[in-house]
Image: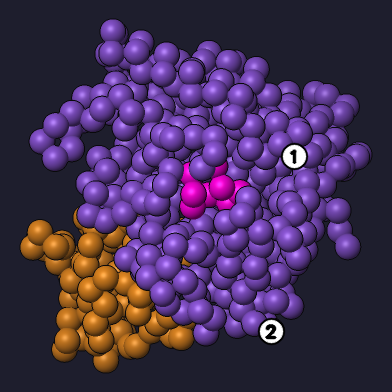
């Protein structure tokens, strides 16, 4: 089971838990504002952009090449950007904090 | 090659030089063919403008047949964002459960009818009806109104003889004018009324602005949705194993929809007007010329997509641009995705197999490129599970 903290652009904090699926799905299940996940999780819509808290980035890891190509054109892209449909939930990311970009 | 295949005519030019050039009514267009160039250009709204003369960014150009600006698609920032913000929530409604249930009723009725007949022409008798009936949900108006749009036939925006038929387009424009006047007299909870009651920059939208949004809503989602629905049925006719898999693994449906949209790319391309001398894929682009973002080519770019010419029904990584890219990405995408997701669900549940009896391909002619985008007609027979 992994506990994930989402902080929305309105500074609302939502804590959610799951043991499988993607972080985007978890965010949608918990109605996290700013995570739309329009494409269902295939890395085509970039509506699930998050900034991983600096201290948690190593736990989550860097984007792959295709995801990075999508991200670098996004507004508010920075070195901690990820599309959370591409982050799988596992014990390895337990406790991370994600700032919702949109 | 399979009858349902949509070959990629852009491969050689995409790899060799990255662009193609087409003539269009003395206003030539440089088509950008590579995924990265298409994405980068779509994001650069300052250099590559949408708010040009109404109709100019469409290819073929509609400058000679219309003056009404389509909104928000022919508007640049910052006004674009103002209009888009007015519309986003309304166009997200297809995610709601009751909307989905209504769509399921519409599609189930059509599939049940299809199962009863020995020969079905999918474009006219299935996809046009589906698109028209589903549109009543998006506009939030009575279902019966769809009979009028079905009655217009396949080509209200263009005729058999011409891709640019002003008289035909006038049918739609006159209809929308009349509907707007009706909504002014009797406001309701339909899209016309909602728009008439909306404010932008502290004032109410004008009738011309409402018309611009409504034309786009009708035009943008007509042949695109009809082609996506028809192409999906043709694909499943030749790939019953995919239908079977969707029945056993409904959780892959969203992935399947994205992959079908990538492969079919129902809108081949969309133009932009260059605002200053610049370069696109190392090719000079002069101010006041046109480029187009070729979604269909970008979606087959082998530098990003493995096996780009195959439908991989559960493709996991699929950064396609079938709904466009950047701020102008398709406003109706949520509706279109829901239509296709429900269609796949109903087909998987009820249909065992489909036979293609006869077909006539619809080939678009873009100068050096001939692209199959769907069908002029396709006759099929559905077989049910029982």
Rendered residue at 27%/91% (across/down): A58
Residue furthest to the bottom: A58
> What is chain A's hue in the picture?
orange
Residue found 83% across the figure and 24% down from its top: B117
Magenta stretch in the rendered image = B55-62
Which corner quadrant of the image does residue B121 belong to? top right
Q: Name the mark on residue B351.
A: 1
- Callouts 1 and 2 in the same chain: yes
Write down the colour of chain B: purple
Q: Looking at the magenta stretch, what is its main secondary structure?
A: loop
State the quadrant of the N terminus of chain A.
bottom left
Residue B276, quarter of the rendered image: bottom left
How packed is label 2: few (under 14 Cα within 10 Å), some, or many (20 or more)?
Answer: few
Q: Nearer the viewer, mark 1 or mark 2?
A: 2
Query: What's the chain of the residue with tag 2?
Result: B
Q: Is residue B159 left or right of residue B53?
A: right
To which residue does mark 2 refer?
B16
């Amino acid at each position: 089971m992994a506990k994930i903290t989402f902080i929305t652009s309105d500074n609302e904090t939502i804590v959610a838990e799951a043991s499988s699926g993607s972080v985007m799905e978890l965010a949608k299940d918990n109605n996290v504002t700013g995570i739309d996940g329009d494409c269902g999780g295939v890395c085509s819509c970039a509506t699930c952009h998050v900034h991983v808290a600096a201290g948690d980035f190593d736990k989550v890891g860097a984007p792959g090449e295709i995801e990075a190509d999508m991200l670098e054109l996004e507004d508010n892209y920075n070195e901690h950007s990820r599309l959370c449909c591409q982050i799988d939930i596992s014990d390895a990311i337990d406790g991370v904090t994600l700032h919702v970009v949109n | 090659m399979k009858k349902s295949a949509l070959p990629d005519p852009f491969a050689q030019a995409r790899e060799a030089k990255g662009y193609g050039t087409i003539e269009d009514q003395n206003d030539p267009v440089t088509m950008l063919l590579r995924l990265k160039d298409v994405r980068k250009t779509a994001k650069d709204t300052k250099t590559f403008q949408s708010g040009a003369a109404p109709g100019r960014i469409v290819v073929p150009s509609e400058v000679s047949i219309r003056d009404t600006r389509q909104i928000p698609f022919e508007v640049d920032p910052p006004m674009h964002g103002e209009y888009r913000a007015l519309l986003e929530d309304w166009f997200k409604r297809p995610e709601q459960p009751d909307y989905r249930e209504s769509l399921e009723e519409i599609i189930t009725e059509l599939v049940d009818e299809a199962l009863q007949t020995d020969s079905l022409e999918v474009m006219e008798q299935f996809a046009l009806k589906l698109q028209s009936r589903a549109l009543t949900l998006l506009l939030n108006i009575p279902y019966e109104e769809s009979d009028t749009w079905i009655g217009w036939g396949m080509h209200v925006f263009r005729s058999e003889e011409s891709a640019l038929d002003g008289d035909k387009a006038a049918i739609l424009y006159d209809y929308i004018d009349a509907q707007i006047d009706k909504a002014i007299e009797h406001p309701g909870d339909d899209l016309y009324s909602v728009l008439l009651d909306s404010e932008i920059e502290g004032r109410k939208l004008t009738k011309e602005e409402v018309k611009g949004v409504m034309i786009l809503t009708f035009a943008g989602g007509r042949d695109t949705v009809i082609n996506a629905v028809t192409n999906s049925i043709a694909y499943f006719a030749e790939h019953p194993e995919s239908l079977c898999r969707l029945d056993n693994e409904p959780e892959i449906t969203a992935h399947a929809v994205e992959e079908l949209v990538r492969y079919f790319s129902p809108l081949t391309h969309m133009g932009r007007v260059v605002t200053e001398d610049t370069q696109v894929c190392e090719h000079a682009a002069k101010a006041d010329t046109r480029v187009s973002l070729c979604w269909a080519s970008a979606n087959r770019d082998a530098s990003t997509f493995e096996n780009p010419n195959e439908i991989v029904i559960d493709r996991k990584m699929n950064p396609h641009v079938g709904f466009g890219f950047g701020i102008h990405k398709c406003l109706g995408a949520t509706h279109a995705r829901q239509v296709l997701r429900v269609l796949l669900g109903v087909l998987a549940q009820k249909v065992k197999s489909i036979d293609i009896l006869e077909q006539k391909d619809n080939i678009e002619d873009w100068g050096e490129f001939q692209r199959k985008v769907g069908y002029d007609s396709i006759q099929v027979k559905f077989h049910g599970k029982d």
